[in-house]
Image (cartoon, helix red, strand yellow):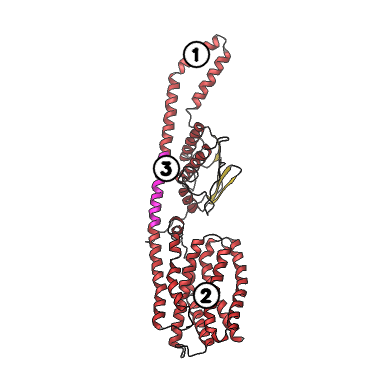
Amino acid sequence: MAESIIISIFVFTLQFCGAYLRYLAIAPHITKQERRNLFRSFACLIVISFGISMRISLTHPELIAHGYKYSLLLGAFLWMGVFFIVIRRRNVEQVFILGMVSCWTFLLHTVSSMICSVCIPGFEGEVLPSFTLAVFEASVYLLLYLLLLPVERHFFRTLLSVGILPFFRETSFGWGIAILPLLILLMPLALILDMTFVHPWQERICRMFLPLIFFFLYRSILHAQRCHQRDVQLARHKRLLKHETEFLRNYTRLMQEGQEGLRILRHDMRHQYRLVYTLMANGETEQAMQHIERQEAALDATVIRPYSTLPLINAVLSIYTHQSEAAGIRFSQKVNLPAALATDEGELASLLSNLLENALHAASTEEEERAITLFAQHKGTQCVLEITNTYTRPLRFAPDGLPASSPEKGHGIGLLSLRAFIEKYHVTALCEQVDGIVRFLLYWQDKRLAAKVCRT
């Protein structure tokens, strides 16, 4: 009975050590509520894990060491299930974390067994009692785990670094990369599922090198992702520059059209004055007033309205006001932005242009009400940008809460620049569709970004 209790304590302690490493990797990417639920599940699972190990040990007391081995394997599935049940997202990343932690723990168990064989007489060949074998191996494992804990904490905390996260999100082979460490462990795990506790030296040496090979492979994957990310950023910048050039070209064309209309009005001004004078002289006051109103409307059409003191923002608003009017879409805006922003004006103008283009395409598909509303407010260091538009068709959302990208024109256009803006300025973004109205809300602190030091 005492031996079963000791073995069970070792089992759930080792399982908790592995779960802690998985938690270190996923902790920066989960909510506070998910973290609380995870801790509650851990408390329940410790009791369940202890009970399963006790059951196996009491049922087969003559095979305590082998029960210890199988309890560890069975418990690993239970702890894995808790992570997937509590955190019902980021499944690709969780599979990758599970594989990396499994590689590490498998490596520690192999090294522990080798140390025991060298330092403890009777361990090699399983001369010692089954209980003693399991206690020695588990004790050496825990000692190695604690000695390497600073390295483990640093490695697993940065496992899902900024560089590798887009690899799972933006590439089509994210799942292939995620299951790679588990596939590497598949063959060694199949070899140890027997009634042997201490395997031959040749086998243990081979088992030790497999995880090491994968860790070097992981570094290669990370380097490849960084190269891929640089290519993506270059393509993104190219698209942004092309987009900015396009709306500046449209703004220039709009100004030229306004100047041409103003030149024509100025050329015909004397003729218009004479016509108004003749109508007034003949007592046709109403016709004269109507003619004056028509001239005022023609004059207003040549004006580039000052929506904002920021020239690029003003250019964007002028272009999309003109396009909305041409498409028969009611466009109302309220913009209160200062002349000096810590946020890059070009990036903000490009973001605003993309969002308004999405809203314009979406609203133009509606047969009944067509409307776009823009609200931009700056107070202190806080910036709020809200865009709403009519769109009655169901909108598909990506896992991050933003609309899913689509090859068709609509809300899928420009989402790449939106995500880049959110990541750079730590923007809180909300997108929802309620009663045929799509609402985009962005909030961020308008502060100077700290300069990033690039290491080569």
Which picture quadrant has residue 43? bottom right
Reading the image, the residue beneath label 1 is 275
Query: Magenta stretch: dominant SS?
Result: helix
Residue type at mark 1: give it: Leu
x then y, percent, for residue 307: 52, 36
- Secondary structure under tag 2 reads helix
Dot 3, how many residues are within 10 Å of its Cα: few (below 14), some (14-19), or many (20+)? some
Distance CA(mark 3)–CA(mark 1): 46 Å
Left or right, residue 296 beside residue 223: right
Mark 1 secondary-structure assignment? helix
CA–CA distance between discs 2 and 3? 54 Å
Residue 63 lies, in percent from the top left, at 54, 85
Q: Looking at the picture, tell me which residue is in the foreground, 435 or 67.
A: 67
Amino acid at pointer 3: His
**In front: mark 1 or mark 2?**
2
| Residue 333 in sight in this render | no
Q: Which mark is residue 27?
A: none
Question: Mark 2 belongs to which amino acid?
Answer: Leu
Nearer to me, 323 or 90: 90
Query: What residue lies at 38% left-to-right and 65% top-to-bottom?
Result: 220
**Which callout, 3 or 1, points to the residue nearer the camera?**
3
Rendered residue at 47%/53% (across/down): 424
Q: Is residue 27 in view from this perspective?
A: yes
Which residue was labeled with disc 2? 73
Residue where numbered disc 3 is placed: 243
Residue at image point 53% right, 48% down: 396
Q: Position of residue 337 (x, y in %)?
A: 53, 42
Q: Where is residue 452 in the image (x, y as percent from the top left)?
A: 43, 57
